[in-house]
Image: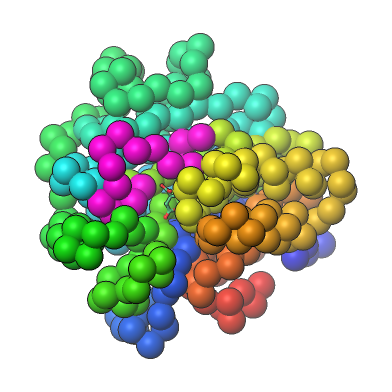
């Protein structure tokens, strides 16, 4: 997919809200509308930054914060529970112009983990801070700290009880598709965004609660630079969602960017090749990929992925299933 010809420099933002075995028949029209509404709000928040001449990093943060603040998505408020009944959040961000990056993992009190990831990137010499260290750092930087109960939602609590009963570790977008999925029929959550600003700079970010019923201390791909998130102006910005352990092993986001840079293939082809590798390793999920010329791809090898795109025309396009990808 390419940008339409226009004299203004291209701006673009893509978002995802997780991929999984989403069953259209079980997803009510109201619920689909609710998801698409938040995706559109996220796109418009990021687009407002880009349209005003803001940078891609700020657009990614604005877009992700909308989804973190929504209980519908597995990030921030509405995050899934670990086995012990805690919400342990992971997030990362990367600036394609400088290849600076920041991330937090296993945090339980930071309202918007993507902001903490940004603070790590811009205010510390580090790339990844975890748990208490990340929380203390975020508090010191003036970010909003909340009681862990802020993240509680009944829906996620019920998911945890079901997962425990079934002895499963589940990804998100689960219960609306199948109340008792068979083993391996896992669903994904996580939110992410990639952006191109009017200066031609790319950025990517990802935020998640991880997996329902995950082991205490488990960290997935989302806060791992090169696995869940990567951005490089020379190639693409990437945010991933899916089987975190496999995405780490496949260095999925970096792998996608490296293929574009070194093999000179379009974003969609690179994403497909990465997803083939993910599948070969026994995983699945999705990738959103954007280059500095505004070519982009929203790809997934699951039945659905909550997604959206917006460009210079300011029209927020959202979808869930492959047939929704009509742009
Ligand atoms: N990749 C995320 C993780 O493993 C989960 C997801 O995208 O659904 O934590």
Q: Residue at x 36, y 68 (%)?
A: 183
Magenta span of residues: 210-224
Question: Measured from the top left, where is residue 195 in percent x and y?
Answer: 60, 46
Q: Is residue 79 magenta?
A: no
In front of the other: 117 or 160: 160
Q: Is residue 211 magenta?
A: yes
The answer to whether residue 124 shows anywhere in this view is yes
Q: Is residue 233 above or below residue 298?
A: above
The answer to whether residue 155 shows anywhere in this view is no
Q: Residue at x 39, y 37 (%)?
A: 219
In front of the other: 298 or 292: 298
Q: Residue at x 21, y 47 (%)?
A: 83
Question: Measured from the top left, where is residue 20 in percent x and y?
Answer: 45, 67
Report the magenta stretch's main SS: loop
In the rendered structure, the answer to whether residue 145 lies left or right of residue 18 reads: left
In the rendered structure, the answer to whether residue 170 lies left or right of residue 52 reads: left
Question: Measured from the top left, where is residue 56 in percent x and y?
Answer: 59, 39
Q: Is residue 294 above or below residue 101?
A: below
């Amino acid at each position: 997919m390419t940008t339409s010809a226009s004299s203004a420099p291209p701006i673009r933002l893509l978002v995802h809200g997780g991929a999984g075995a989403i069953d259209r028949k079980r997803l009510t029209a109201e619920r689909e509308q609710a998801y698409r509404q938040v995706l559109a709000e996220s796109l418009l928040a990021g687009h407002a930054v880009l349209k005003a001449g803001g940078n891609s990093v700020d657009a990614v943060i604005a877009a992700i914060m909308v989804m973190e603040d929504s209980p519908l998505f597995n990030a921030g408020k509405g995050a899934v529970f670990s086995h012990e009944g805690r919400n342990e959040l992971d997030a990362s961000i990367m600036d394609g112009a400088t290849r600076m990056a920041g991330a937090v993992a296993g945090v339980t009190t930071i309202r918007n983990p993507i902001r903490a990831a940004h603070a790590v990137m811009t205010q510390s010499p580090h790339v990844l801070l975890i748990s208490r260290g990340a929380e203390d750092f975020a508090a010191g930087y003036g970010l909003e700290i909340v009681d862990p109960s802020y993240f509680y939602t009944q829906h996620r609590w019920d998911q945890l009880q079901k997962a425990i009963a079934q002895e499963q570790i589940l990804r998100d977008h689960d219960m609306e598709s199948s109340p008792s999925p068979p083993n391996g029929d896992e669903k994904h959550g996580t939110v992410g965004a990639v952006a191109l600003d009017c200066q031609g700079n790319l950025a990517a970010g990802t935020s998640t609660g991880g997996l329902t019923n995950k082991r205490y201390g488990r960290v997935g791909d989302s806060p791992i630079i090169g696995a869940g998130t990567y951005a490089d102006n020379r190639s693409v910005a990437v945010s991933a969602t899916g089987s975190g352990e496999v995405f780490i092993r496949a260095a999925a986001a970096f792998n996608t960017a490296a293929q574009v840079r070194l093999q000179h293939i379009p974003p969609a082809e690179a994403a497909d090749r990465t997803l083939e590798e993910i599948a070969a390793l026994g995983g699945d999920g999705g990738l959103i990929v954007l280059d500095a010329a505004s070519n982009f791809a929203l790809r997934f090898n699951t039945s659905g992925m909550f997604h959206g795109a917006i460009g210079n025309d300011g029209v927020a396009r959202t979808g869930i299933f492959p047939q929704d990808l009509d742009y």
